[in-house]
Image (spheres, rainbow, N blue to C red):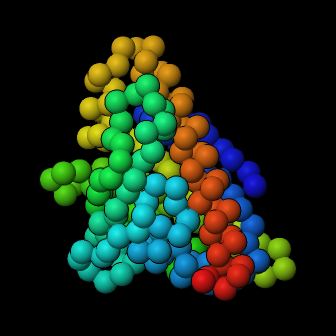
């Protein structure tokens, strides 16, 4: 598994992990584009429901149920326990890419995009890249950072990037295991 993280100018986060899966890209795409199943792989998302549009179609909206443990970046003012988020599908190109942008409270897309990119791997398998990109700070991130001084902001961004990387690595490994055992 490869892990990448960098923050070029104008970006808050760019984090991604790769995993090889012994299944074809179409099979992997169908599994990861089924967002209600995200509770099977995500450390935070417990699943959710499509609230508008067709499942996995560009423009469709998914409402996720989430849970964050109290010990996650415990010193910072982040949401803990249960909460919901909405995201909008911004790309759904079977079998190569599936992306969704987080929405703010007013329903506007933010520069906070989660994605799965798929490419052919060895022996008919798939290389799955699970990535997250944040350009302009989101509504939630602005609130968190507003409560911190400069040193706290730098520390938070570094620790949050590590948390994202760890969560994505966990997710990618869980996806691999589920798909390789038949998606059950």
- Image height of 133 relative to 65, above or below: above
Residue located 26% across and 80% down the image: 53
Residue located 45% across and 35% down the image: 12
* Residue 105 appearing in the image: yes
User: Looking at the image, which residue sits at the far right?
Assistant: 123
Residue 45 image point, x, y percent: 43, 60
* Residue 111 appearing in the image: no
Residue located 64% across and 53% down the image: 169
- Image height of 101 relative to 89, above or below: above
Left or right, residue 3 beside residue 150? right
Residue 183 sits in quarter:
bottom right
- Nearest the viewer among 94 and 68 is 68
Residue 165 sits in quarter:
top right
- Nearest the viewer among 166 and 72 is 72
Q: How many marks?
A: 0
Residue 129 image point, x, y percent: 63, 61
Residue located 53% across and 31% down the image: 159
Residue 156 image point, x, y percent: 46, 27
Give the quadrant of the C terminus.
bottom right
Give the quadrant of the N terminus.
bottom right
Residue 9 image point, x, y percent: 48, 31
- Image height of 71 relative to 178, above or below: above
């Amino acid at each position: 598994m490869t892990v990448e993280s960098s923050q070029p100018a104008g970006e808050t986060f760019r984090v991604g992990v790769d995993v090889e899966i012994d299944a074809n890209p179409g099979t992997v795409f169908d599994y990861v584009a089924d967002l209600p199943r995200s509770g099977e792989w995500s450390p935070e998302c417990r699943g959710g429901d499509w609230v508008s549009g067709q499942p996995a179609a560009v423009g469709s909206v998914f409402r996720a149920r989430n849970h964050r443990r109290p010990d996650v970046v415990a010193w910072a003012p982040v949401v803990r326990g249960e909460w919901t988020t909405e995201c909008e599908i911004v790309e759904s190109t079977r079998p190569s890419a599936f992306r969704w942008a987080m929405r703010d409270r007013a329903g506007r897309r933010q520069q906070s995009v989660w994605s799965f990119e798929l490419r052919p791997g060895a022996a008919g398998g798939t290389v799955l890249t699970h990535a997250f990109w944040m350009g302009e700070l989101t509504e939630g991130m602005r609130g968190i950072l507003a409560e911190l001084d400069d040193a706290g902001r730098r520390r938070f961004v570094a620790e949050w990037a590590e948390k994202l990387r760890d969560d994505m690595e966990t997710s990618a490994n869980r996806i691999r295991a589920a798909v390789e055992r038949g998606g059950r």
